[in-house]
Image (tube, rainbow, N blue to C red):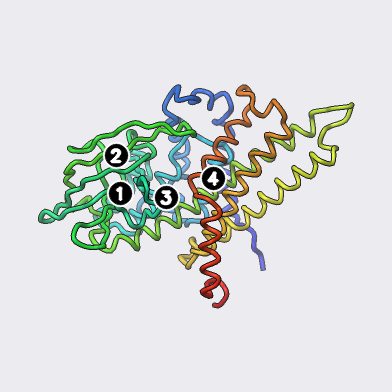
Amino acid sequence: MDFGFSDEQREVRDLARRILGEQVSPRSLQAYDEYAAPRFDEDLWRALLDAGLPGVAVAAQWGGMDFGFLELALFIEEVGRGIAPVPAIQHCVGGMLPLQRFGSAAQRARWLPAAVSGELLLTAALTETGNDWSRAPRCVTARRDGDTLCLRGRKSAVPFAAQADLVLLPAALEGGDDVAVVLLDPRGAGVTLLPCESTSFEPQAHLQLDNVRVPPEQVLVGRGGAAAMAWLAERMCAALCAHQLGAADAAMRMAASYTGERQQFGVPISTFQAVGHRMANCYIDVECLRLATYQACSLLHDEQAAALETRIAKVWAGDTGHRVSYATQHVHGGTGIDRDYPLWRYCLWLRHNEMTLGGSGFHLAAIGEGLAGGQGLFA
């Protein structure tokens, strides 16, 4: 049995790698350091859109490539490899996937072709202060007023909120435990964007909502939104693991190249046993993350249950990012923290993704509880 990628999947990966490799460089990324400019390369995004890559998982009838989540994960892995300044996860996973899955025929026809072509930029507001469960929002509430929803509350650190045309946003319905999911106009009446900064230099903003009225045509899920958010949360986590895989692999290869060239006592430092062991451990970590991520993405691609596999990938993504960032800094010595050398940006993103995914201890405890209850042990 062949467990390798198909020719079409390799072509998607290679196309993304070629475009990103040609247009992303340490020099181009330097323009966004320390918030010198919003971390969004619109020319690069347009090149990716023209190649059809952001729409790789969108059906052909809406202008996409008609592939699935695994192909999208391969594209996002290459975005992570270049730590490219584009909203790939937010637009493709946080916006287009739930719109295609849960939107009405009218909503899909109205917004999906525009999102695939780049006329429309989407993002998702999933983060709330003090609440780790995006599927059960607490900080934004929705009150029904006829066929309109009125929103109040706050979402934290929404990526590309100021650049987006629509923001996917879950809200708790008043008078019960139900959840609604809407597509919010971030420039609508009652919406205030409060810019915030993160270690990744990605453009983010807090969303303050004061009696924001959402018409019915912008309500993606009127009732039962918790299931939709659980569906989305797994795919957002798997996509972030794919991004982490690309970044970790690039950092490891950068360190391997450096240790093969850097000489001490007349020989490359890669010949030193301690350095070789550290790089071997990096390789093992990255390959384990690769297998765990591809397993989770493959199951999600086939719409199979993947809660356990996604948690395992999150553990490996967090731990691999942590260990690889330390090891690559170590073998580089002082060069690794020099801002004129590109490694520091990868270490920053590896730690940023690690913190975004959450502590491994929490996920391991959840995996243990699942195994104790028979999850993953029986068909």
User: Horizontal and vertical percent for residue 217?
Assistant: 20, 52
* Mark before the other along the chain sequence, 4 or 2: 2
Give the numbered dot on residue 186: none
Residue named by callout 4: 354
Earlier residue among tags 4 and 1: 1
Q: Is residue 248 above or below residue 171?
A: above
Q: Residue at x 29, y 52 (%)?
A: 138
**Mark 3 or mark 2, which has the lower sequence index?**
3
Asked whether the residues under the numbered discs 4 and 3 touch, taking CB atoms below 8 Å apart as contact, a structural biologist would say no
Give the CA distance from mark 4 to mark 2.
24 Å
- Mark 3: which amino acid? Val
The residue indicated by pointer 3 is 93
3D distance between C-alphas at marks 4 and 1: 23 Å
- Mark 2 and mark 1 in contact (Cβ < 8 Å)? yes
Q: Residue at x 49, y 65 (%)?
A: 302
Residue 175 vs residue 88, the one in the foreground: 175
Observer able to see residue 284: yes
Horizontal relation, residue 323 to residue 93: left or right: right
Counting other residues with Cα less than 10 Å from the Cα at mark 1, is it few (<14), some (14-19), or many (20 or more)? many
Q: How far is mark 1 from mark 2, CA to CA?
A: 10 Å
Q: What amino acid is at disc 2?
A: Leu
Judging by the rendered image, the residue that carries numbered circle 2 is 207
Graded by Cα atoms within 10 Å as few (under 14), some (14 to 19) or many (20 or more), the crowding at tag 2 reads many
Q: Nearer the viewer, mark 4 or mark 3?
A: 4
Residue 345's place in the image compared with 309, above or below, is: above
Q: Nearer the viewer, residue 334 or 85?
A: 334
Which three-letter amino acid code belongs to the residue tagged 4? Glu
